[in-house]
Amino acid sequence: MRITLPIILVAATVGLMGIGLTRFGRAHVGGTISVEEDSSFAALTPKPTTPELALTNLMTAVQRRDWDQAYAALSESSDIDKQAFIEDWKGSNGSLRAYSVLEGYEPHPLHITDDNAEIRVHIRFASPVGPIEDVRDIHFVREGDTWKAVWPKVHIATVPAQVVPVTYLKWDLVTGSSADLWGQKNVDSPHVRITSMTAVNTAEGAVVMGEVVNEDTIPAFVNVNATLLDAAGNSIDEETSFDKIDHVLLPKQVTPYRVDFPNVDLKRVKSVRMDEHATLVPASADPVIGVMNQKVESDVQGKAVLEGDLMNESGDIVNIPHVIASFYDSNGKVIWVSDGYVDRALLPQSSEPFAVEIPRSVASRVQNFHVVVNHYNMEGS
Amino acid sequence: MWRSPISLVISLVCVALCPAQELRVPASVTAGDDASISTTGSGKATFYLLGPGASRKSDVNLGEEIRLPGKDVQHAGEYVAVLCSSTCDSATFYVSAAKPMTLAFVVHPSRVPVAENEAVSGVAFPFDQYDNLVLAPETISFQLASKNAPAISKATRTEDGVAWFRTASGKSAGPVQITASLGDITEKRALQQVASDPCNLRIKGERTAKGIVVETDPVHDCAGNVVPDGTIITFTASDATGKSTVDAPVKAGIAKAQIDASGPAVITVASGIVMGNELRIGGQQ
């Protein structure tokens, strides 16, 4: 009995190590793993004798944040230095990429010859705002008996040292005294109005969307709630716009909103009850973010996207820009609302590209669109 | 006839027990004032006083007056006095609010666009020093004073403790002081009259080395009031490369934006649901 337990523990440990090594050797294509930085397993990476193995090694090293190993998987013909390569994956300036981890990937070989290969990689990042997908076409070359990735030059925005005078308004909020009988000296809540509302059925469920305007002269923190009612007036489901809205609206500002009802069929719905909630909020008119060169295009996968560039016209870094777009038909009716996060920080006086997807069923009817930019900053949104 | 269930129950009990003594309560009592209740009979008895926010039990001598100090009758409303020896007797009396000491004054809204009918309302409630609503009719004088308009006054009698007014907002943006007065009691509230929606929104622009700089003329409402700083003006430029938009806040009455466009562009402007003029700018030379 005295030696039986140690023998069992040693055998179990060896067995688990064996299972671990076996899984490590074969399961990374399209899989999801979580590995500590600079893991000692790095030495066990198989020799990249095929483009697929080269991709596996590269992505595994990136997942582990083993930047030495990852950079070593690049061809010398790559037009990128190590710091820029790391920043490409790791993000900087408090951007969304800096809070994201590579969750998995899916390779789709496009073509391969004896010395060259092109693989389209669908990359999934896990982020605080949900999964983020990226598609990259990675070129591989054979160098001797191994394959290596050719990494293109990455444009990392830099801004020269400068002083940007900022004189935009800022609104602070002073709350009344608790001794104020009936709140008779309080300031009224901002006046906001839903200017349009449309309900549609999608494959995922019912969607209620439209636009809201702040008709007041002070900033408002806005949320839109929607309740679906059946023929008897009973509530079927109640949801909020969550992050599908620009919550902080300055005076006369318009934002799209979208409320999703997963797995609810609109045929069951007789009416929709809308509630817009507006509260006083401290706010700043800075930063001003321009949305330049907006156009509807097809991406590499053939999907319709609205793309353009965000231009930060202010002196603050915008850590996480969030784009919300409303799409209109020829009658000016809102037919869809899309949103997307930009995973690069928006530096002062510089621009970053963005793209938001338009569903196939809607794309052909889009005649016009309106884009607003929400922003989250490290010192508050 | 029966003002409360308590008095009904107590009276029914008293009827059953046939009182040997009597209570005589005052016809009217003012909140916070001393009062007394006279009794008949002889011997010892127990006195109970039940009222809104007050209850008391004490031993008394029948035939003597029961003194009610002002602190026992500070809350306006119906009180029940019960006197029990071998049997019980009860009576009810009403405590009225004392003279007005404070005014609760609620004005709505705290911000109002100019030139809107029936947009401003105010309600005043007189209270005595013990926070009882004064139900007796009182005359309250409302006064609205702003910088660029003559003061408006209106006197209103309270009904059931409430006086109110409703009026249109003025023509000029700026603060309005609203006062409610009752005797020497005065309550002041401030209301902000703000510019209405922008009117005749016009823009001008020019091409620079960095793109197109476009700005509005001073943005006014239809009454000529400058819209508040921070109001968002949306500039939209359409050119061959697509559409560019900038939501720019008004600063010192003017909104300004820089738009990145190299070719000929058509620029439009809007604020909320109000549209402005259209501007055509030629391409870069």
Image (cartoon, coloured by chain):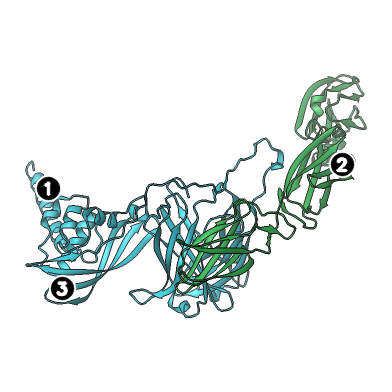
Residue receiving disc 1: A9
Q: Mark 2 to mark 1: distance in Å?
A: 91 Å
Residue A123, compared with residue A365, is above or below; it is above
- Percent across and percent down for residue A43 are 11, 54
Residue B170, compared with residue A46, is above or below; it is above
Circle 2 SS class: strand
Q: Nearer the viewer, mark 3 or mark 2?
A: 3
Tint of chain B: green
Q: Mark 3 to mark 1: distance in Å?
A: 48 Å
Instruction: Give a yes or no on whether discs 3 and 1 share a subunit.
Output: yes
Residue at 42% of width from left, 64% of height from top? A309
- Percent across and percent down for residue B28 are 91, 32
Residue A347, compared with residue A244, is above or below; it is above
Tint of chain A: cyan
Residues packed near mark 1 inside 10 Å, few (<14), some (14 to 19) or many (20 plus): few
Residue receiving disc 2: B141
Type of the residue with mark 2 = Ser
Q: Quadrant of the N terminus of chain B?
A: top right
Q: Nearer the viewer, mark 2 or mark 1?
A: 2
Residues packed near mark 2 inside 10 Å, few (<14), some (14 to 19) or many (20 plus): many
